[in-house]
Image (spheres, helix red, strand yellow):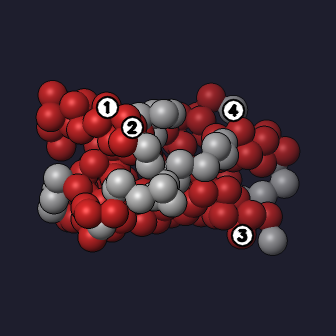
């Protein structure tokens, strides 16, 4: 059950919702009651999958960004688009960074970044972040 909870928190943390998967992962690793490798895999998979949802939202809903219910504000999209324009697809390595990371994945979809490139760069960044947390705990 704890792995499912970690997956859910990690997934939601990759959306605009204010969750912190890093704190949960660090706490679970610190308790030493669970398989650390499995914790890393579950957290990474959940967080990556949440960002993939953002990419699909961006890719398939370009005309929906003005709707009130849309999960990202126009200012967040503009800020992420500027960041993305400045640093290109390599900025996806930093999709884990709070505040800019989630809209950055949406901007990647809006700007039609190839899914394969998106997934590779995103995975490198997010798994590296979790691995660093594991290493320092």
Identify residue for label 3.
4
When the figure is inspected, residue 21 is found, relative to residue 5, above or below; the finding is above
Task: Indicate left or right for 36 with 78 as reference.
Answer: right
C-alpha separation, residue under disc 1 versus residue under disc 2: 5 Å
Q: Neighbour class for label 4 at 10 Å: few (<14), some, many (≥20)?
A: few
Identify residue for label 2.
76
Give the structural element (helix, strand or loop) at label 2: helix
C-alpha separation, residue under disc 2 versus residue under disc 3: 30 Å
Q: Considering only order in the chain, which callout, 3 or 4, is on the residue closer to the N terminus? A: 3
Q: Neighbour class for label 2 at 10 Å: few (<14), some, many (≥20)?
A: some
Q: x and y percent of residue 27 in the render?
A: 78, 41
C-alpha separation, residue under disc 4 versus residue under disc 2: 32 Å
Give the structural element (helix, strand or loop) at label 1: helix
Badge nearest the viewer, 3 or 1: 1
Identify residue for label 4.
137
Q: x and y percent of residue 6 in the render?
A: 70, 59
Marks 1 and 4 close (CB-CB < 8 Å): no
The residue at the point 15 percent across, 34 percent down is 85
Identify residue for label 1.
79
Task: Indicate left or right for 110 with 56 as reference.
Answer: left
Q: x and y percent of residue 58 in the render?
A: 30, 60
When the figure is inspected, residue 84 is found, relative to residue 28, above or below; the finding is above
When the figure is inspected, residue 23 is found, relative to residue 47, above or below; the finding is above
């Amino acid at each position: 059950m704890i792995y499912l909870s970690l997956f859910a928190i990690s997934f939601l943390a990759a959306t605009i919702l204010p969750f912190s998967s890093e704190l949960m992962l660090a706490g679970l690793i610190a308790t030493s009651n669970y398989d650390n490798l499995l914790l890393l895999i579950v957290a990474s998979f959940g967080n990556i999958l949440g960002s993939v949802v953002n990419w699909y939202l961006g890719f398939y809903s370009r005309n929906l960004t003005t709707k009130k219910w849309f999960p990202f504000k126009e200012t967040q999209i503009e800020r992420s688009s500027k960041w993305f324009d400045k640093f290109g697809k390599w900025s996806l390595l930093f999709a884990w960074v709070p505040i800019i990371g989630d809209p950055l994945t949406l901007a990647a979809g809006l700007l039609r970044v190839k899914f394969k490139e998106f997934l590779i760069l995103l995975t490198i960044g997010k798994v590296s972040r979790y691995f660093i947390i594991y290493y320092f705990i």
